[in-house]
Image: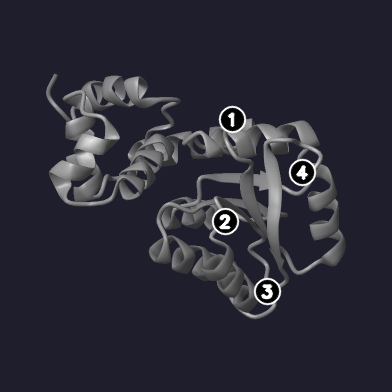
Amino acid sequence: MKPPLRILIVDDHFFVRAGLKSSLESEPDLTICGEAANAAEALLAHSTLRPDLILLDLRLPDRDGLDLLEHLKNRDPSTQVIVFSVDETETDIARALEAGAAGYLPKSSPRSQLLAGIRAVAEGGTSFPPTIAAKFREHRSRTPLSPREREILHLIVDGQPNKLIAAALGISENTVKLHVSNLLAKTDAPDRTSIVKLAIQRGWVRP
């Protein structure tokens, strides 16, 4: 049996953190390993607790949330981050995607959507509400791939699993997983097979 997914909640409102903790810890596959009310606490908790996933409010009192997100992903690419915030602009959400967020969920999300989003990201996918996904579908389809993403895309097309891709490129398997997650977000593809189809259709690779 897999151990519970360890989640760190980063939000400056006590009642938001308490509500999330109460809601999520009733699920046997999830556990709250820590809480943080600001960016400084988040960085300390991340380094000491090593959570699997972070629920991150972008509006923090001591640091820009997007800057914190980028810092966290640079420190440990394997840590998955879902932006859990309110009234963010399309530009903010786009920047969060580019910084490595695996999902965005409004604080108004029903519990069922929150749980589904967390579990989707835990399995290596992404999670965006239909309204957000629709707004960014065109944006993601136009987003140019980085050189590393193109390298990984070619190896995915060749049928290579993450372990062999990591060995071929001299990077960790967790870093490969992060790049694959970014490819899924940029292409709006639900899985690796769909990435291959889209890459061929758009002429990014040859079949």
Judge by depth and name the residue closer to the eye, 128 or 89. 128
Answer whether residue 64 is visible to the viewer in this image.
no
Label 3 residue SS: loop
Residue lying at 70% horizontally and 47% vertically, measured from the top left: 31
Residue lying at 45% horizontally and 64% vertically, measured from the top left: 70
Label 1 residue SS: loop
Answer whether residue 189 is visible to the viewer in this image.
yes
Q: Which residue is mark 1?
A: 1
Residue lying at 53% horizontally and 56% vertically, measured from the top left: 91
Q: Which residue is mark 2?
A: 51
The mark lying in front, picked from 3 and 4, is 4
Judge by depth and name the residue closer to the eye, 8 or 39. 8
Mark 2 surroundings: few (<14), some (14-19) or many (≥20) residues within 10 A: many
Give the alpha-carbon distance from disc 3 to disc 4, as whole Å. 21 Å
Label 4 residue SS: helix
Mark 4 surroundings: few (<14), some (14-19) or many (≥20) residues within 10 A: some
- Residue type pointed to by label 1: Met
Give the alpha-carbon distance from disc 2 to disc 1, as whole Å. 19 Å
Which quadrant of the figure contains the C terminus? top left
Residue 11 figure quarter: bottom right
Give the alpha-carbon distance from disc 1 to disc 4, as whole Å. 19 Å
Give the alpha-carbon distance from disc 2 to disc 4, as whole Å. 15 Å
Q: Which residue is mark 4?
A: 24
Residue 8 x, y percent position in the rendering: 65, 57
Residue 114 x, y percent position in the rendering: 71, 38
Residue 122 x, y percent position in the rendering: 54, 39
Q: Which residue is mark 3?
A: 38
Residue 166 figure quarter: top left
Mark 1 surroundings: few (<14), some (14-19) or many (≥20) residues within 10 A: few
Contact flag, marks 1 and 4 (Cβ < 8 Å): no
